[in-house]
Image: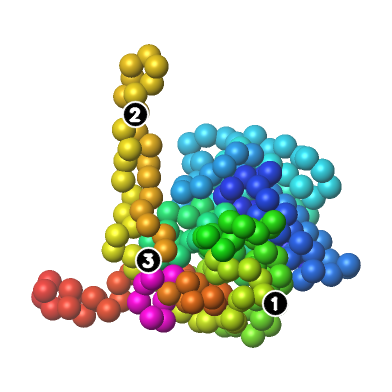
Amino acid sequence: MRILITNDDGINAPGLKVAEAIAAEIAGPEGEVWTVAPAFEQSGVGHCISYSRPMMLAELGPRRFAAEGSPADCVLAALGEILPGRPDLVLSGVNRGNNCADNALYSGTLGAAMEAALQTIPAIALSQFLGPETATLENPFEAAADHGADVVRRLIHKAPWQETADYRLFYNVNFPPVPAASVKGMRSVAQGWRPDSFFGTVPTTSPSGRRFVWIKGGPQHEPTKPGTDVAANLEGYISVTPMRADLTAHDALDALAGALS
């Protein structure tokens, strides 16, 4: 099996090492693990691609490359220029912090998985929810490191992938903010909604007097509705959410047709 690894935290991020270990276990001694990750952090860029400028590629070691672009760029560069053939699987992560609820809409981690799915390659986004219990751990990614390979293996062999669909499925996996031994299991859940976690701005002034703003996120530990991602994570479960790139609100089509007739 040939597995491609990418992320949005950058080529030197500790979560990338966790993903590489997971991939190595899944691929086995006869498999190949390739890493193509952003040269610098690309958190929050979503499914952005560098359509109007080229990106530099740097080979850092065997099957290990940095790209001066977004996570989705990294997938495209891997497929078009770097890998000797198509990968059997793309793993994106392990992200530092959750990509649940509205975070999923901004996530470069999910953007890479989405691009892989658009390229008809099975893809899984992996993120580690952080909190007070992970802050005291020697490895904050402990839950992902210990349980990641099992989750990926189950998804590869047992989950639906809908290979004939126009928009392929990909999976969003979030590991709970607890030690590995406290993980209760896995749950199939919907994307949640946190009404109070909107992004906002924090103004600042440079020493030269110029105005700037920082983008700031909202609270991360308020549970979403039962049966959704944040709620499952805060209860100690690994959340697994099937996603696709189709943005159509199918439930509104009939009402819209009536309004337009």
Residue behind mark 2: 204
Q: Are marks 2 and 3 in contact (CB under 8 Å)?
A: no
Q: CA distance from mark 1 to mark 3?
A: 28 Å
Q: Is residue 238 magenta?
A: no
Residue at disc 2, secondary structure: strand
Q: Nearer the viewer, mark 2 or mark 1?
A: 2
Q: Nearer the viewer, residue 130 or 260?
A: 130
Query: Which quadrant of the view contains residue 212?
Result: top left
Looking at the picture, does residue 225 appear above or below residue 45?
A: below
Q: Nearer the viewer, residue 143 or 65?
A: 143
- The outermost residue toward the top is 208
Q: Earlier in the sequence, mark 1 or mark 3?
A: 1
Magenta region, residue range: 222-230
Q: Earlier in the sequence, mark 2 or mark 3?
A: 2
Position above or below: 73 against 239: above
Tell us which disc is closer to us: 1 or 3. Answer: 3
Between the C-alphas of marks 2 and 3, the distance is 28 Å
Q: Quadrant of the C terminus?
A: bottom left
C-alpha gap between disc 2 and disc 1? 45 Å
Question: Disc 2 marks which amino acid?
Answer: Thr
Quarter containing the N terminus = bottom right
Q: Position of residue 222 (x, y in %)?
A: 37, 66
Q: As drawn, which residue projects farthest toward the bottom? A: 158
Residue visible at 13% across and 78% down in the picture: 258
Q: Position of residue 182 (x, y in %)?
A: 62, 75
How crowded is the residue under tag 1: few (<14 C-alpha within 10 Å), some, or many (20+)? some
Residue 222's disc number: 3
* Residue 101, image quadrant: bottom left
Query: What residue would you read off at disc 1?
Result: 150
Q: Amino acid at mark 3?
A: Glu
